[in-house]
Amino acid sequence: MPIYSYNIFKPFSVFLLIVTALIAASIFAETNYPVKLKFEQVRIHEVDALLSSQNVPEIIVSSWKTAHEKFLSEPPTGKIARYDLNDDAIEEVFLYLSGHGMCGNGGCHLIIFQFNKDNEKLEYKTARSSSDDILILNNSTNNGYHNLAIRLTNGATRSKTAAYTLYRWKNGDLEQTHETLLFQ
């Protein structure tokens, strides 16, 4: 009888060990590997609403409006992604504007908004020439914010760099470092 009961519990123990290993592996992967931001196309009026937020630089707003007037057959587009950069359970909003009139040699417009709890609104924080190829580095933080790796794009030629450039959040702004990262 003891041999029989041992054989019954042995497969169950192996099963529990496998399940535990899979759960641990997924938690490890989630915390240590970068998360690629997933951008989704948004309508023009949604971009207009975000750009009408306080403190968005006028150059960005006027570039968006001018590009829509000038390039009627191929107007610029807006895409957004959301991610909680500081683990406060409130997602920051990334707005990426691309297309004719929105891109230059440094890339297209990436704008980050953060929710202000005091006035319960999204507020403009920073803008960069960038691409929509952005990784959140979960194992790398600065002042409580996750660092970002951005694969820069030449907006004129649409060619992307091989490596990602590391950015750190500093006082409401993305600070570009001289560090580059290669991901396989």
Image (cartoon, rainbow, N blue to C red):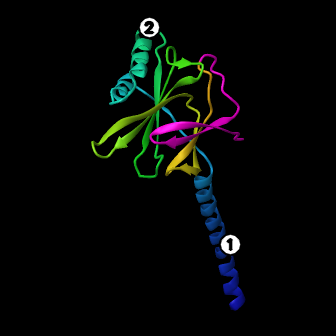
The numbered dot on residue 70 is 2
Residue 112 spot, x, y in % from top left: 45, 35
The numbered dot on residue 2 is none
At x 69% / y 78%, what residue is drawn? 10
- Quadrant the N terminus occupies: bottom right
> Circle 1 sits on which residue?
14
At x 53% / y 23%, what residue is drawn? 108
Q: Amino acid at mark 1?
A: Val
- Quadrant the C terminus occupies: top right
At x 40% / y 25%, what residue is drawn? 57
Label 2 or label 1, whichever lies nearer to me, is 2
Q: Is residue 157 left or right of residue 96?
A: right
Residue 146 spot, x, y in % from top left: 53, 47
Other residues around mark 1 within 10 Å, as few (<14) / some (14–19) / many (≥20): few
Q: Quadrant of residue 55?
A: top left
Residue 178 spot, x, y in % from top left: 65, 36
What segment carries the magenta color? 156-184
Q: Secondary structure at mark 1?
A: helix
At x 62% / y 71%, what residue is drawn? 16
